[in-house]
Amino acid sequence: MAEIAADLSFCEIRSPVLLPCYTASTFFVLAAMNLPFHPPTLMKPTLQQRLIRYLQEELLIPKESIAVALRHEGQTPNLLPMVLWQYGLVTIDQLDKIFDWLETASQ
């Protein structure tokens, strides 16, 4: 298992959230151990990941601001837009756009 841990790295994929990245040798170790292999790049992005991408690409919210809100979100789970607004990281107009996006994205 130490070989697997040594072979895992972390990469930033257009968001402040760090995701594990697997190398080819990790794949072969997992396959030899008959363990499932699910690379993060093949998983469907979660609503929160899509929201973060929207915040960065469409509303141009800096990733540092999003990171601050994500650290404080633990106190108010699933309320990232409200935390952003509470800390003055988005305007009321941006907050309205975020809620509109969430409404259409969750359908």
Image: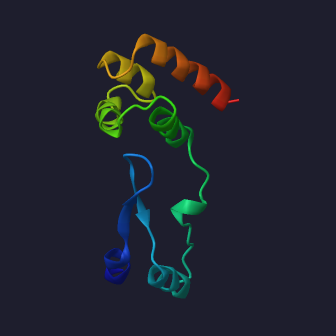
Q: Give the camera-side residue of 62 and 6.
A: 62
Q: Residue at x 60, y 19 (%)?
A: 100
* Depth check, front residue: 88 or 79: 88
* 18 to 101, vertically: above or below: below
Q: Residue 51: x percent and y percent?
A: 52, 35
The answer to whether residue 79 shows anywhere in this view is no
Give the image quarter of residue 68: top left
Q: Who is closer to the viewer here, 6 or 99?
A: 99
Q: Quadrant of the N terminus?
A: bottom left
Residue drawn at x 34%, y 83% is 3
Question: In the image, what residue occupies the spot 64% across and 31% down?
Answer: 105
Report whether 59 appears left or right of 44.
left
Residue 6 position (above or below residue 9): below
The location of residue 7, given as percent across then percent down, is 36, 78
Say left or right for 58 vs 73. Answer: right
Most extreme residue toward the bottom is: 32
Residue 42: give x, y in percent of width and height: 60, 61
Please say if 102 is above or below 9. above
Quick one: which residue is furthest to the right in this view?
Answer: 107
Query: Which quadrant of the figure has residue 43?
Result: bottom right
Q: How many marks?
A: 0
Describe residue 70's horizontal placement relative to residue 31 as left or right.
left
Q: Residue furthest top?
A: 92
Q: Say above or below: 5 vs 88.
A: below
Q: Which quadrant holds the C terminus?
A: top right
Residue 71 seen from this side: yes
Colour mapping used in the image:
rainbow
